[in-house]
Amino acid sequence: MLSPLLTVIGPTGSGKSALAVALARHFDGEIINCDSLQLFRGFDIGTAKLPLAERLSPPHHLFDIRSADESFTAADFARHVNALLPEITARGRLPILCGGTGFYLRALLRGLSPGPAADPLLRARLEQRSNLPRLLARLDPEAAQRIHPNHRNRVLRALEIRILTGRPSSEIFAQGTDPLTGYRVLQLGLEPPREALYSTLNRRSVRIWEAGLVEEARHLLTLYSPAAKPFAALGYKQALDYLAGRVTQDEAIADLQLKTRHYAKRQLTWFRAEPEIVWQQDFGTSPQIFEQSVILTERFLRGSV
């Protein structure tokens, strides 16, 4: 018999964590992080990570498991979750995957072809190119549309796959291997009204900045190189620009607000292309959404969804 797995997904700022925690308390669940940045230690304010005390009950997994100078891929994520799920299920708890990194979720549920191994010499040559997104657009237009130009590592990997295999990365990954087995999945998606979401993100950007984002970034720079992957993330990039004197505080906050809205839009575009998501048109903090989610989850656990 297949075991149940619940996912709570959607754009940044949609209230995923609040809903996941409420459902975990209601259904005796444990939460698994599906945010590619919240797994890095020390990157707390900019990622809107729940405080540690709030991650103890209900139990949270895959938070703070890597330092910023360590890599963590979608394949790593799938392997970690595949190891966690049987442990949670054996405890009689409901595993609840929560986050907005769609590529991680796809890697878990549908599997990934590993593709060719990394080629250090090719990587070194590509790193010397001045405009990698433009090169990707010429060699692999579909990947160029799917990958944001600022996601340098993903751009590099797509180029590497295209050059080494002679085939687009989308074609390689479409052959996904090792999809999740032994579980049936209910995917709850949050899609608040667009204007309300954007207003929330604008306010949250200010709160994050005022909560000490710059001070957190300054401290992290004493531990890691500014080239470390998490520093390219929303919030930290603006904080580093501010610390370097490239922008004023007002300019940094305005850029953070704009880029966060764009990121939320890209997340929704990604998730809209995914099958079998049950969409709910409000924030996860809404009592009505919680009640609706409880009904959907109860039906799912009975096997009727």
Image: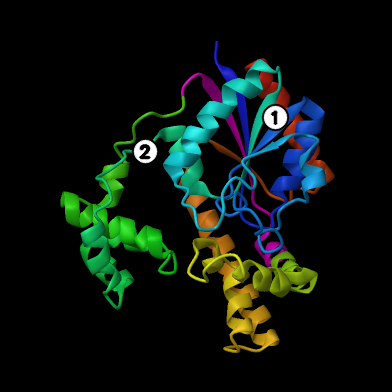
* 119 w.r.t. 91: above or below: below
**Could you say whether the residue bearing mark 1 is in a helix, strand or loop?**
helix
Where residue 170 sits in the image (x, y, percent)?
A: 30, 49
* 153 w.r.t. 277: above or below: below
For mark 2, does the 10 Å Cα neighbourhood hold few (<14), some (14 to 19), or many (20 or more) residues?
many
Amino acid beneath label 2:
Leu
Left or right, 236 with respect to 52, comes to left
Where residue 3 sits in the image (x, y, percent)?
A: 59, 18
Q: Is residue 186 magenta?
A: yes
> Real-space Cα distance between discs 2 and 1?
29 Å
Amino acid beneath label 1:
Leu
- In this rendering, the label closer to the viewer, 2 or 1: 2
In this view, the residue farthest toward the left is 166
| Res 60 quadrant in image | top right
Left or right, 4 with respect to 26, comes to left
Viewer-side residue, 117 vs 291: 117
Q: In the image, which disc is placed on residue 83?
A: none
- Identify the magenta region: 181-198
Q: How is this picture coloured? A: rainbow
Query: Which quadrant does the C terminus fall into?
Result: top right
Q: Residue tagged by mark 2? A: 112
Report how many numbered discs are placed on residues in the image: 2
Left or right, 301 with respect to 244, comes to right
Q: Residue tagged by mark 1? A: 296
- Give me the residue at 63% from left, 83% from top: 242
**Could you say whether the residue bearing mark 2 is in a helix, strand or loop?**
loop
Asked whether the beta carbons under mark 2 and mark 1 sit within 8 Å of each other, the answer is no
